[in-house]
Amino acid sequence: MAKSSEQNPRYNLTTQHPHFMRRKDIENALRLSRSTIYEMMSQDKFPKQFRISQRSVAWRTLDIENYLSDLQDGQHD
């Protein structure tokens, strides 16, 4: 996965989700189910979430944009 602090121009999710996305945001934006997201994470095929509070996690929007870019470039199965 691309590790960059620059915004990815191909996928601009930052308009609606400036810094991070919750799971429901990802499910809606990418049309993926909860189980698919976590299965792909366990296979290192999807960005890992980070803890934003004791009971909440989120994904960095830039990580999701980079994932989508890598996916289009054929860097993920």
Image: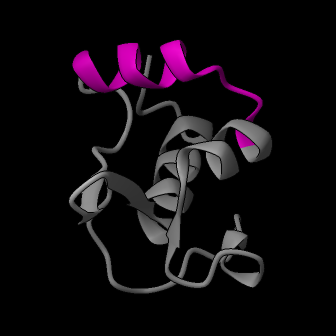
Q: Nearer the viewer, residue 14 or 6?
A: 14
Q: Which is more toward the observer, 42 or 58?
A: 58
Q: Residue furthest front?
A: 55
Left or right: 49 in relation to 33: left
Report the side of 40 relative to 66 (left or right): left
* Residue 62 to residue 64: above or below: below
Residue 25: image x %, image y %? 68, 52
Residue sitting at x 42%, y 27%: 76
Residue at 65% in and 44% down: 24
Q: Quadrant of residue 9?
A: bottom right
Q: Residue at x 60, y 84 (%)?
A: 18
Q: What's the residue at 70%, 66% (across, down)?
A: 10
Give the percent coordinates (x, y) of residue 68.
58, 47
Q: Report the magenta stretch's main SS.
A: helix
Judge left or right: residue 38 versus residue 16.
Answer: left
- The region drawn magenta spans 30-43
